[in-house]
């Protein structure tokens, strides 16, 4: 499945989830209709069938009519009475909405805007849920969680696709195979694994109930494992803590409390008679023991997080690249030309004697304009700046040409033409008018 199709699939699931939540809340509030996961999965199947027909035949009417007619027998089997008509309306609405989105290109900014609207809709439904039956409200909250999971993954993937974020692998057969395996693993076990598991677990009642029992068993097992591990850590760290406490006690007795009776029994491995005589109870020891466990667990977790952050795959993209500066011979003509007095004066006063200097200076003005508009960031490449600028203006005429010309001029000895200079100027004027 291509990256475009993957994102379209996530969009379909995201839209179907939010429309289903709205439909369940609205029909239950108005008609006391109770819709369940059967309607949700039936609508998903119908929508995916619609997309297949539309991609193959490129016919809207055929893509709407055939899946809708095919869903009627299943409606008759799964539902009764008025619920058949009500749920059929939902399926048709889901088909129309998803068909409208299918025709649109992948647009991260559009998805981001839709996600904000979805958050507002969920907030309104959460308020309405106070007037719904408790079972319906609990059911809707499960779909809330599923919708948020799918939305987060959709925004991440669409952003990467829209801004072409990613590191291209080396052009070798071995590197390509590793890249394919890595992408397959990431798609199956991370992105789509999370989406499929959360959707099935949160939307279907039987799987959800079994999942709860499994989670409880897993939680008890984790408690045992963590308890044993912390006991082991305490046995290792305990003597060190006792030594530190004894040293601090001696310092306190010597410098501040000379009349204090000392006691040096182990805090972890023997009973303290002073504590027993002072009326300390077993509960006090349990609280102390639990506190020490929590502190040690926090230290251990922070240590693990620090180790993971230092691993290569947790580094930021900027840290994964090594900047290689060009080495130049100081005796070369090019080096002498770049560091001559006239060249320095040209840079100071911006004496645009060549086409190359003119284009570079115009692009520098473009960076300043976009920086004032809070678009340009210092880490951006020319392509990233172009894509981000496109998302903030309506008319992007000549912007692609300007970026291509700039890259060619900046990173080669190419001498641009007068026509290319005019294109760069037109692009700058166009951006100026809009920003």
Image (cartoon, rainbow, N blue to C red):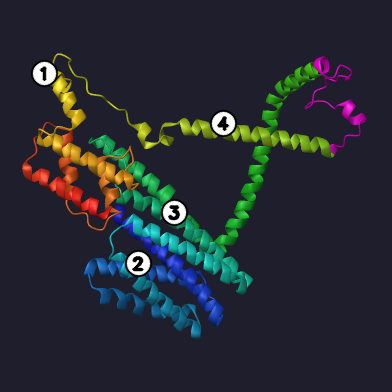
Magenta-tinted stretch = 253-282
Mark 1: few, some, or many residues within 10 Å (few <14, many ≥20)? few
Packing grade of label 2 (10 A; few <14, some 14-19, many >=20) is some
Q: Which residue is mark 3?
A: 152
What residue does disc 1 label? 333
Q: Which residue is mark 4?
A: 303
427 or 99, which is in the foreground?
A: 427
Reply above or below: 27 against 185. below
Pointers 1 and 2 in contact (C-beta within 8 Å): no
Q: Nearer the observer, disc 2 or disc 4? A: 4
Where residue 363 appears, x then y in whole percent? Answer: 21, 41
Is 136 within the magenta?
A: no
- Which residue in the protein does label 2 denote? 48
Estimate the spatial distance between the alpha carbons at disc 1 and disc 2, rounded to whole Å: 65 Å
Disc 4 from disc 3: Cα separation? 28 Å
Which residue is at the far front? Answer: 349
Residue at coordinates 18% horizontally, 24% vertically from top-left? 344
Q: CA distance from mark 3 to mark 2?
A: 21 Å
Q: Give the foreground label among 4 and 1.
A: 1
- Residue located 7% across and 45% down the image: 419
Residue 283 left/right relative to 75: right
Give the secondary structure at mark 3. Answer: helix
Give 417 or 114, whichever is nearer the viewer. Answer: 417
Q: Which residue occupies the foreground of this view, 430 or 231?
A: 430
Q: Residue 281 colored magenta?
A: yes
Q: Earlier in the sequence, mark 1 or mark 3?
A: 3
Q: CA distance from mark 1 to mark 3?
A: 55 Å
Q: Quadrant of the N terminus?
A: bottom left
The earlier-in-sequence mark between 3 and 2 is 2
Q: Position of residue 203 (x, y in %)?
A: 51, 64
């Amino acid at each position: 499945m291509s990256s475009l199709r993957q994102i379209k699939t996530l969009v379909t699931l995201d839209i179907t989830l939010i429309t289903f939540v709205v439909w369940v809340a609205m029909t239950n509030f108005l008609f006391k209709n109770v819709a369940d996961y059967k309607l949700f999965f039936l609508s998903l199947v119908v929508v995916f069938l619609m997309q297949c027909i539309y991609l193959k035949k490129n016919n809207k009417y055929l893509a709407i009519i055939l899946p809708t007619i095919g869903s009627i027998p299943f409606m008759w089997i799964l539902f009764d009475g008025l619920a058949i008509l009500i749920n059929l309306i939902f399926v048709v609405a889901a088909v129309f909405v998803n068909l409208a989105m299918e025709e649109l290109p992948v647009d991260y900014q559009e998805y981001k805007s839709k996600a904000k609207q979805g958050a507002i809709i969920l907030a309104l439904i959460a308020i309405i849920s106070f007037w719904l039956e408790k079972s319906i409200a609990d059911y809707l909250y499960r779909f809330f969680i599923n919708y948020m999971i799918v939305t987060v993954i959709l925004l991440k993937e669409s952003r990467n696709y829209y801004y072409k974020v990613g590191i291209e692998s080396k052009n070798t057969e071995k590197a390509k195979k590793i890249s394919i395996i890595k992408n397959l693993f990431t798609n199956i076990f991370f992105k789509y694994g999370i989406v499929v598991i959360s959707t099935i677990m949160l939307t279907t009642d039987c799987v959800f109930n079994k999942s709860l029992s499994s989670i409880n068993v897993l939680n008890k097992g984790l408690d045992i494992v963590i308890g044993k591990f912390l006991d082991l850590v305490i046995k290792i760290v305990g003597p060190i803590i006792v030594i530190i406490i004894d040293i601090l006690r001696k310092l306190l007795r010597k410098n501040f409390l000379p009349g204090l009776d000392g006691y040096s029994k182990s805090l972890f491995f023997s009973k303290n008679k002073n504590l027993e005589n002072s009326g300390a109870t077993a509960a006090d020891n349990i609280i102390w023991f639990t506190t020490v466990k929590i502190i040690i667990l926090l230290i251990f977790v922070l240590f693990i997080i620090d180790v993971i952050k230092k691993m290569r795959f947790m580094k930021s993209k900027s840290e994964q690249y090594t900047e290689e500066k060009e080495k130049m011979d100081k005796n070369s003509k090019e080096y002498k030309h770049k560091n001559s007095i006239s060249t320095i004066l040209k840079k100071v006063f911006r004496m645009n004697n060549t086409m190359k200097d003119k284009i570079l200076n115009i692009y520098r003005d473009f960076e300043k304009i976009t920086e004032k508009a809070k678009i340009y960031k210092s880490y951006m490449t020319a392509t990233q700046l172009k894509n981000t600028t496109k998302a903030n203006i309506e008319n992007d005429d000549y912007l692609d040409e300007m970026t291509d010309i700039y890259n060619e001029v900046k990173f080669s000895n190419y001498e641009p033409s007068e026509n290319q200079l005019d294109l760069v100027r037109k692009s700058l004027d166009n951006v100026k008018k809009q920003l």
